Amino acid sequence: MQFRYLGNSGFKISEITYGNWLTHGSQIENDTAAACVRAALDAGITTFDTADVYANTAAETVLGEALKGERRQSLEIFTKVFGPTGPKGHNDVGLSRKHIMESIDGSLSRLQTDYVDLYQAHRFDFETPLEETMQAFADIVRQGKALYIGVSEWTADQLRAGAALAKELNFQLISNQPEYSALWRVIEAEVVPTSKELGISQIVWSPVAQGVLSGKYLPGAPLPEGSRATDEKGGAGAVKRWLSDDVLTRVQQLTPIAQEIGLTPAQLAVAWVLQNDNVATAIIGASRPEQVVENVKASGVTIPAELLGRIDEVLGGAVERDASHTATRSPQTREA
């Protein structure tokens, strides 16, 4: 396992992060979730990402149990705040001071830890003054409940405004967590250049494009039983955008490219995002321990420039690059 600095800080994390969105507390049984976490630890992963909204707080509880007994100083535990939790009342969502200060305590209790290494604004909150949000984060850092602060799916302008306020409050934003894959490159035009300027790294999710880049979905063929694309409660909607015959045919052409450097298509997809020097880590999820064991093999891989060019040629017009998509990730009004 290789390690990288997160943002302009001295904080190192594993370049493969284990994340439990869609799985822990919902899709898979707790003993399987624990086995996946154990596989991650055994493979050298030290960084774990979750959020209070995942499975309405259950995912944090499962992760806390799975990590219990591990040396805390050897782990990097990330969680997030924004989404609706609890009974989804009017203050159970967003980035108000009330919701942030209550949410961090709930997360720490469920994760069975005194602090999280990184606390992230899961989305941008248009209903709360940014000054209020950043002051709450500053107080949480000063209280020792979070060591670092990050955000998720913020636009370049939002990152710039947040970073400026953080600097005034004597802390810094060090990370952004966007979707990023060889098929979804919307951060490259604006978010990445701005982040480099501000000393912010990307913690990227869905590097395998919801499993599509693994090559398991075949053009013109039925969807594999038990796959995410067949699970309406577990992310099927997010997968559908990639299930056209054109996209799937292009993805199949990546297999021989992966084989040239001894990788599976899924490993190639994870290694691809790690070629971006603004990416600190790629989040992988798993419903089986074997998936963790396989995907960590992407760590430390260098994809030759010639192959990167061929990947671009193969995917061609299937790649989404429109930077405006980031702006639509944060809801204009709260869900609760």
Image (cartoon, rainbow, N blue to C red):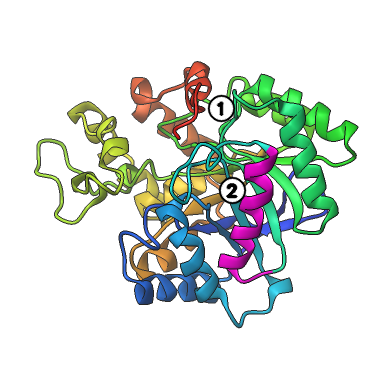
Label 1, residues with CA under 10 Å away: few <14, some 14-19, many ≥20 = many
Please name the residue shown 53% across and 45% down the image.
Answer: 303
Of residues 21 and 279, the one drawn nearer to the viewer in this rendering: 21
Of residues 295 and 258, the one drawn nearer to the viewer in this rendering: 295
Residue 56 can be seen, yes or no: yes
Name the residue that disc number 1 marks.
187
Disc 2 marks which amino acid? Lys
Q: CA distance from mark 1 to mark 2?
A: 20 Å
The reply, left or right, for residue 205 in relation to residue 168 is left
Quadrant holding the N terminus: bottom right
Q: Is residue 270 depicted above or below 201 in this figure?
A: below
Residue 110 on the magenta span:
yes
Name the residue that disc number 2 marks.
80
Please name the residue shown 66% across and 45% down the image.
Answer: 100
Circles 1 and 2: CB distance less than 8 Å? no
Q: Secondary structure at mark 1?
A: loop
